Amino acid sequence: MTDTPSLDFWFDFASTYSYPAAMRIAPLAQARGVAVRWRPFLLGPIFKAQGWDNSPFNLYPAKGRYMWRDLERICATLALPFAQPSPFPQNSLLAARVALVGLAQGWGEDFCRAIYRAEFGEGRNIAEPATVASVLASVGQDAEDPIRQAQADPIKAALRAQTEEAQRLGIFGAPSFTTGGELFWGNDRLEAALDWARRQAA
Amino acid sequence: MTDTPSLDFWFDFASTYSYPAAMRIAPLAQARGVAVRWRPFLLGPIFKAQGWDNSPFNLYPAKGRYMWRDLERICATLALPFAQPSPFPQNSLLAARVALVGLAQGWGEDFCRAIYRAEFGEGRNIAEPATVASVLASVGQDAEDPIRQAQADPIKAALRAQTEEAQRLGIFGAPSFTTGGELFWGNDRLEAALDWARRQAA
């Protein structure tokens, strides 16, 4: 086969382990020749369908305490800045919609990384339009037009459709990776997912 | 410092991802000069304290479907046999008690690996005394004496104490690894935990 290996990267800006995954995926994929499609979605509706009205890291405190320490260690290993944001989880709706605008215009990946860095590297609140606007500025975008588009019907519908597709694919957490009918869940599965994509196309 | 690096390996025979961890830990620890203490415990009381009366992989079907496929892929990568046991989860009480007998007598690690292989490599039911007896025979032990000791008060109390200690340490799943005041959770954290143990002792 001569197909270019490809993989879908599913993430929610509220998801903690999506931060290191978003920061790692581009060079790892490039080294393997795998094309990555960034797919923001919302975990909220998927968690609700599992009976959770909050992050499992808040619902199960032992797991939550562990996760923050584990994420701190992972960031130290990767030399990524780390700060626990408050509140947690953050409302990721506006950032996800703006990401969809940016991904269609070529600046989406930079914006996604910058949002994650603001949230989990600097502890800023990405639910606030002012934070999203300053992140847009940091990647060279004027804020007004993307935020206006993000609040219009086509982008709202696109994010809903993407979330429904994630659910249909069996996605139950983030980050997730899909390739060749396989689902991989978790920052720690990123390399295995990319390797799978490459093997399927070989 | 001249301390020998050491790590506690916490596992429940009902835990799926503890299977690859149990099969991998000895050579990885040896290569790093880390001494491993095998600590069987029971997840049941810890899950109950979180409000679960069953495995989360049964309570959350999307997560359960993913886990079985993920475990199958991991076993294929490691060239480990894989078979989904029925019922799941299995009652691991007798096997955990026999493991405590064996760990005090020098044959415990071989027994633990053989139990995991019977359960997740061959799909056998480790809740049955006949399975435990045949696993004991496979590691060169007579069944009668260990099973009798496993059902006497000192071993029963030791397993209860070990489970309570796991809970005090903040353990909420298996496999878990503790070293130098740090907790690591999951087969995919084994290398990081061993590296931490080695660094702490350096």
Image: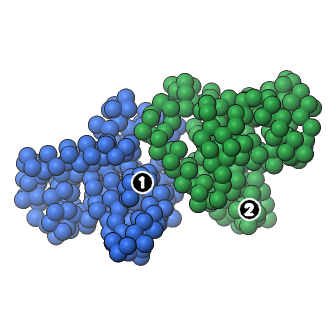
Chain colours: A green, B blue
In screen coordinates, is B3 left or right of B108?
right
Callout 1 amino acid: Glu
Chain name for mark 1 = B
Query: What's under tag 2, amino acid-wise?
Result: Pro
Asked whether the beta carbons under mark 2 and mark 1 sit within 8 Å of each other, the answer is: no
Residue nearest the observer in this picture, A162 or A82: A82
Label 2 sits on residue: A27
**Residue at left offset 9%, top offset 49%:** B154
Using the rendered view, name the quadrant where residue A88 is placed.
top right
Per the model, the C-alpha gap separating discs 2 and 1 is 30 Å
Q: Under tag 2, what secondary structure? A: helix
Mark 2 chain? A
Label 1: element kind:
strand
Q: Is residue A159 left or right of residue A193?
A: right
Q: How crowded is mark 1: few (under 14 residues within 10 Å), some or many (20 or more)?
A: some
In the visual, does A30 lie left or right of B23?
A: right
- The residue indicated by pointer 1 is B182
The image position of residue B185, as x and y in percent, is 44, 51
Please determine if labels 2 and 1 lie on a single subunit: no
Of A96 and B165, nearer the camera is B165
Q: Where is residue A17 in the image (x, y as percent from the top left)?
A: 60, 46
Given residues B142 and B193, the one toward you in this image is B193
